[in-house]
């Protein structure tokens, strides 16, 4: 094998796949990267047995294949490539030793038997959706933060994906918060598709795809697949039944809903967080159309920020909004993260009483759908919302 490649192309592709290489020192084969040089392209592959990624780079002015071949090289090649300065970088395989040459610099790296590497077969699964990468990336990034990082309930470490009729939904929860995102599809499905995908792996994978391309989504047995014309990612889905938290939350909302400026409330929460290292609880008080946010624990000092509301809706039409007094406690970090990931200028915050979920909803819901519906709320009505469970107050 003999190839010449620009530093930027080499580093970009190695860095994208190495995230999915194994980290167990007992399995050095999985800690390596497979590089395949073909007549018109290079393939970079890494796997940790649960997740596998493959990137294809076609030959152009930055990539040329002088001699075809395959090498399984230790992932130290990523660090080596980042340190090189001269163009192009040459990779030559000779007697199971990979030479990396750049100008006057020359490195030799150990390799492994290619036959010992897991066989990566082309996917035979038919895709069930074809979505622009930018749309899919936004959906995944907007819900992955709410997934659990604890091993106590492994199913909660995933993003639950559902396809029903012409709607694809993503939701995640760690039992303290829930995030939901919906994408309308051009195709209508007769059968419902459900699966739970590891959140961390999915986020890392989607962020490595070219945002300008479209991505096909497939499922084969217990394997979920993302693929474009130059990249394929596979991961095992999580076993078990995902809790049906969403249905319980989407009950009739006879709640107080406050419309606030997103930037202003984020700035207020950032200031409150300076005083919440001991206890991450804030107090939210609405009085006379103004919100006061302050930290509950005063041992570090006190921050008190006043925010004017854009609008208020209350469940009792006989009560004027300006006469309403609402007070609840909340986890400052959870509320901050939930608001930050919603893409809009105004945020609707709903509150229904002590020990009830706080809802954070896109302004479109507030403007177009109303907040005091007597009918159960349906996911199809929304594109984006959050819940924090439950609220807390002294």
Image (cartoon, rainbow, N blue to C red):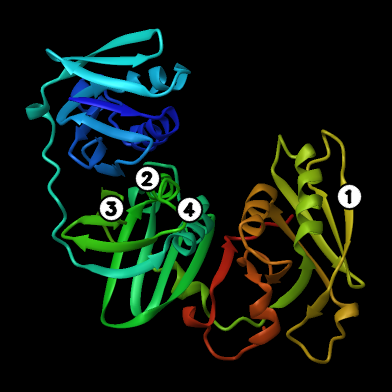
- Against 65, residue 219 (above or below) is below
- As helix, strand or loop, the secondary structure at mark 2 comes to helix
Labelled disc at residue 304: 1
Residue 152 or residue 79, whichever sits in front: 79
Per the image, the residue denoted by label 4 is 144
For the residue labelled by badge 1, is the local secondary structure a helix, a strand or a loop? strand
- Label 1 and label 2: CA atoms lie apart by 39 Å
Q: Which residue is mark 3?
A: 238
Q: Nearer the viewer, mark 4 or mark 1?
A: 4
Discs 2, 4 touching: Cβ within 8 Å? no
- The answer to whether marks 1 and 2 mark residues whose Cβ atoms lie closer than 8 Å is no
Q: CA distance from mark 4 to mark 1?
A: 31 Å
Measured in 3D between alpha carbons, the distance from the residue under mark 3 to the one under mark 2, in whole angstroms, is: 12 Å
User: On the picture, is 34 further left or further right than 374?
Assistant: left
Picture disc at residue 201:
2
* Mark nearer the N terminus (3 vs 2): 2
What residue is rendered at 52% in x and 61% in y?
178
Badge 3: few (under 14), some or many (20 or more) residues near its Cα, within 10 Å?
many
Q: Is residue 33 left or right of residue 88?
A: left
Earlier residue among tags 1 and 2: 2
Looking at the picture, does residue 159 appear above or below residue 362? Answer: above
């Amino acid at each position: 094998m003999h190839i010449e490649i620009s530093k930027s192309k080499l580093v970009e592709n190695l860095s994208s796949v190495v995230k999915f290489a194994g980290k167990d020192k007992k399995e050095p084969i999985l800690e390596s990267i497979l590089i395949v040089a073909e007549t018109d392209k290079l393939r970079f592959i890494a796997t940790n047995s649960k997740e596998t990624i493959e990137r294809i780079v076609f030959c152009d002015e930055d990539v040329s294949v002088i001699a075809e071949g395959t090498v399984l090289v230790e992932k130290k090649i990523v660090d080596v490539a980042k340190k090189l300065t001269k163009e192009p970088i040459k990779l030559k395989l000779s007697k199971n030793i990979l030479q990396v040459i750049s100008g006057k610099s020359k490195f030799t790296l150990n390799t492994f038997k290619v036959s010992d590497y897991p066989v990566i077969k082309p996917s035979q699964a038919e895709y069930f959706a074809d979505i622009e990468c930018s749309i899919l990336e936004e959906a995944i990034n907007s819900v992955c933060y709410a997934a659990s990082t604890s091993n106590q309930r492994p199913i909660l470490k995933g993003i639950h994906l559902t396809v029903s009729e012409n709607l694809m939904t993503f939701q995640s929860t760690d039992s303290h918060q829930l995030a939901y995102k919906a994408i309308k599809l051009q195709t209508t499905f007769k059968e419902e598709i459900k699966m739970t995908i590891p959140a961390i792996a999915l986020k890392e994978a989607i962020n490595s795809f070219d945002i300008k391309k479209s991505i096909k989504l497939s499922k084969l047995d217990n394997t979920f697949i993302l693929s474009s014309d130059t990249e394929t990612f596979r991961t095992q889905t999580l076993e078990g039944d995902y809790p049906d938290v969403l249905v319980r939350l989407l009950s009739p909302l006879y709640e107080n809903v406050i419309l606030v400026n997103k930037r202003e409330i984020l700035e207020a929460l950032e200031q409150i967080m300076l005083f919440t290292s001991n206890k991450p609880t804030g107090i939210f008080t609405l009085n006379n159309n103004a919100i006061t946010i302050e930290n509950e624990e005063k041992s570090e000092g006190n921050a008190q920020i006043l925010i004017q509301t854009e609008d208020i809706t209350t469940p009792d039409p006989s009560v004027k909004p300006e006469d309403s007094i609402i007070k609840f406690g909340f986890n400052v970090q959870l509320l901050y993260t939930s608001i930050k990931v919603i893409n809009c200028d105004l945020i609707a915050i709903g509150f229904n009483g002590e020990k009830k979920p706080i809802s954070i909803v896109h302004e479109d819901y507030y403007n177009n759908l109303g907040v005091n519906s007597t009918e159960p709320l349906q996911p199809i009505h929304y594109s984006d919302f959050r819940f924090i469970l439950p609220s807390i107050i002294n």
